[in-house]
């Protein structure tokens, strides 16, 4: 009996061991993978859906679209939205839920049952969403499971379409390129070294340009995880979602990895010219360049950027109303803004001569302008004009061995106030100047204020001459209230009245009763050839007379 019990116990232990070993396969079983799938088909392409759009409306038909996720909110640059695309077009889905990227990754195929949703446009950007305050808004989160369905696991990352900025033209409502994932080669940013999106604004526009000077707005949210990244130098490849705001193309980066191959090397610009008066840049070359030094640019006057409305818009058809700028192009018949450079016209003789509002006959004429090449109206432009040439006449500023442009500051000059609380200050007039006045509305104050150059060596110079550019208004006698001096024994700092100064007279200057800037006649300084000098502008005012003196440029030339 004892042996029988032992046998039974052995059999029970063996059975339990077999049972346990049959339940363990080395490690624990992996949980099953849940692969989403749908049991219905799409019956409408994204292109067909977008082409059917005329105005904000609820979708009442059983429309089903499908598409691959090409952009989501992973970086924070897209907020509560994602973009899907099929082989025909792409569309933005507005969804009132954050962290969409955790479920809808790039490459994920999704189906959208559109019935019960709304289709509308936000300033020409067609979206799928829901009604909000009578306009297109976001689909409520509770509606997601009834309208958006994933199918299978995410596939390969979507492939962007390679385009050039020259292909874009002017966007219109329903343009099928809107919301597509695109790539641009050989492009550069106008704001090299700045951050993508400072924190003092919800979003910031940056300017992307190609070798031909065509440009595109890159809009970045301050909430993106690359907002504080520095904009790279040089030319590279940029990928993003092509968007639109009104009639302006925009690009939205999905994350910082959408920037590739920015080496800092800038290819030579296309176009013609070297920026001199004898061989000016044409518009194509000017748009591909940048220069803080003045260069000559030649082009046809074809229109203006009208700035009188709620939005700044280019206009190529008279009558024109804006006088502060013109558009130049390499063809007199150009009507594509992408092929133009806007030119800022400073108040005074240059604006009076060139603006199309007062000179409609200038349209189509060939003109040369002298200015710096920098962004203007968010595209390559020409600013800080100091010269022009039209129909055989114009202003050709002299160039010399010493030049001060007073770009909104005192520049290399210093100011010394002998009397009064008012001082010389930088201003923006005439493309940048310095100004002094004893008039503080409604009072006039006594002042004696000097604006003094650094020491200027005339060693080896002969036939030295000086000219400067000025405007003065509300003066009684400009030669008494706005004097020009030269000294050879000023200490370089301190009270100028402790030095010997010789007043310079006998040259053409402002009449003293206008804001119009004029270039003075040449002032002969040959008596100081070979010496070291200081030049000073002395302003005085009283309780009876307090004019305003503005100086935008001073230079010295020599015969050798």
Image: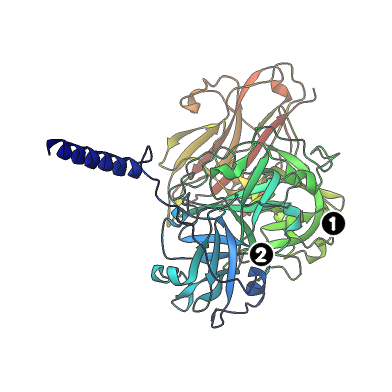
Vertical relation: 252 (above or below) 357: above
Mark 1 or 2 closer to N-term? 2
Of helix, strand and loop, which one carries label 1? loop
Residue 502: percent from left, percent from top: 61, 28
Q: Is residue 297 left or right of residue 73?
A: right
> Mark 1 = which residue?
331
Vertical relation: 58 (above or below) 416: below
Which residue is drawn at the image coordinates 44% and 68% (left, top)?
144
Front residue of 223/53: it is 53
Q: Is residue 365 left or right of residue 432?
A: right
Which residue is drawn at the image coordinates 82% and 65% (left, top)?
361
Residue 521: percent from left, percent from top: 73, 40
Asked if residue 349 shows in the view, the reply is no
Q: Quadrant of the N terminus?
A: top left
Residue 36: percent from left, percent from top: 49, 60
Estimate how packed mark 2 is, as few (under 14), some (14 to 19) or many (20 or more) residues with alpha carbons within 10 Å: many
Which residue is drawn at the image coordinates 53% and 67% (left, top)?
38
Front residue of 530/58: it is 58
> Mark 2 = which residue?
89
Among the 4 quarters of the image, the one containing residue 179: bottom right
Which residue is drawn at the image coordinates 46% and 69% (left, top)?
138
């Amino acid at each position: 009996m004892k042996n029988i019990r032992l046998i039974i116990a052995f059999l029970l232990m063996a059975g339990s061991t077999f049972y346990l070993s049959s339940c363990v396969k080395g490690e624990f079983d992996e949980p099953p993978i849940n692969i989403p799938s749908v049991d219905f088909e799409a019956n409408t392409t994204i292109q067909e859906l977008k082409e059917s759009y005329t105005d904000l409306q609820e979708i009442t038909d059983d429309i089903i679209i499908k598409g691959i996720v090409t952009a989501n909110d992973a970086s924070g640059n897209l907020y509560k939205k994602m973009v899907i695309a099929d082989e025909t077009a792409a569309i933005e889905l507005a969804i009132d839920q954050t962290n969409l990227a955790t479920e809808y990754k790039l490459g994920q195929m999704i189906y959208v049952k559109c019935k019960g949703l709304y289709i509308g446009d936000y300033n020409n950007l067609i979206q799928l969403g829901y009604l909000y305050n009578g306009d297109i808004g976001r689909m409520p989160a509770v509606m997601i499971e009834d309208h958006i369905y994933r199918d299978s696991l995410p596939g390969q990352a979507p492939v962007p379409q390679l385009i050039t900025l020259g292909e874009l033209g002017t966007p219109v409502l329903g343009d099928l390129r809107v919301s597509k994932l695109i790539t641009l080669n050989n492009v550069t940013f106008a704001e090299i070294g700045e951050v993508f999106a400072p924190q003092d604004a919800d979003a910031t526009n940056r300017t992307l340009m190609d070798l031909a000077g065509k440009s595109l707005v890159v809009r970045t949210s301050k909430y993106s995880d690359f907002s504080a990244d520095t904009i790279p130098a040089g030319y590279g490849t940029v990928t993003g979602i092509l968007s639109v705001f009104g009639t302006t193309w925009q690009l939205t980066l999905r994350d910082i990895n959408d920037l590739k191959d920015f080496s800092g090397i800038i290819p030579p610009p296309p176009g013609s010219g070297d920026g001199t008066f004898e061989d000016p840049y044409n518009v194509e070359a000017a748009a591909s360049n940048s220069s803080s030094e003045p260069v000559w640019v030649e082009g046809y006057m074809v229109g203006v950027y009208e700035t009188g409305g709620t939005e700044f818009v280019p206009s190529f058809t008279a009558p024109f109303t804006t006088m502060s700028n013109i558009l130049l192009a390499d063809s007199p018949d150009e009507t594509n803004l992408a092929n133009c450079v806007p030119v800022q016209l400073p108040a005074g003789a240059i604006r009076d001569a060139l603006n199309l509002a007062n000179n409609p006959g200038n349209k189509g004429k060939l003109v040369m302008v002298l200015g710096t090449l920098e962004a203007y109206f968010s595209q390559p432009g020409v600013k800080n004009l100091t010269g022009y040439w039209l129909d055989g006449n114009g202003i050709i500023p002299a160039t010399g061995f010493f030049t001060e442009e007073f770009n909104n500051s005192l520049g290399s000059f210093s100011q010394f106030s002998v009397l009064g609380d008012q001082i010389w200050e930088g201003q923006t007039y005439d493309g940048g100047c310095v100004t002094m006045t004893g008039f503080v509305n409604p009072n006039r104050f006594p002042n004696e204020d000097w604006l003094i150059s650094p020491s200027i060596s005339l060693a080896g110079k002969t036939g030295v001459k000086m000219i400067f550019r000025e405007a003065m208004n509300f003066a009684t006698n400009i030669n008494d209230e706005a004097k020009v001096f030269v000294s050879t024994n000023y200490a370089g700092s301190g009270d100028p009245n402790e030095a010997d100064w010789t007043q310079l007279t006998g040259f053409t200057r402002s009449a003293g009763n206008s804001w119009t800037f004029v270039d003075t006649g040449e002032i002969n300084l040959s008596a100081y050839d070979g010496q070291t000098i200081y030049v000073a502008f002395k302003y005085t005012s009283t309780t009876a007379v307090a004019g305003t003196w503005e100086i935008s440029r001073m230079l010295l030339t020599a015969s050798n």
